[in-house]
Amino acid sequence: MRRLLSTAFILLLLAAAALPSEASAKRIALVIGIDQYDNLQSNQQLKKAVGDAHAVGEAFRSLGC
């Protein structure tokens, strides 16, 4: 799962970098990180989803998105 998120993040960064600055200024992103799910046992809960979402958000901000 982490590899999939990392790959998606890299693809999003590449796509954002390829956009003209005018187009990227009009774009927004909704980044959600959820660590705790009601239907999962404690040993199945995520540990870093919230931190990953913060990192993705910071990366987008640093790109001016």
Image (cartoon, rainbow, N blue to C red):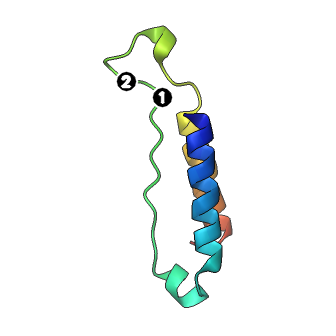
Asked if residue 32 lies left or right of residue 20, the reply is left
In the rendered structure, find residue 37 and report the number of the disc placed on it: 2
Identity, as a three-letter code, of the amino acid under mark 1: Asp
What percent of the width, then of the height, locates residue 10? 64, 57
Secondary element at tag 2: loop
What percent of the width, then of the height, locates residue 47? 57, 25
The residue depicted at 43 percent of the width and 24 percent of the height is 36
Task: Determine which quarter of the picture holds residue 59.
Answer: bottom right
Task: Locate the C terminus and report the quarter of the image it occupies.
Answer: bottom right
Q: Which residue is identified by label 1? A: 35
Task: Locate the N terminus and report the quarter of the image it occupies.
Answer: top right
Q: Are marks 1 and 2 in contact (CB under 8 Å)?
A: no
The residue depicted at 60 percent of the width and 60 percent of the height is 11
* Crowd band around label 1 with a 10 angstrom C-alpha radius: few (<14), some (14–19), many (20+): few
In the image, residue 24 sits, relative to residue 4, either above or below, namely below
The residue depicted at 60 percent of the width and 86 percent of the height is 21
Task: Determine which quarter of the picture holds residue 48.
Answer: top right
In the image, residue 5 sits, relative to residue 46, either above or below, namely below
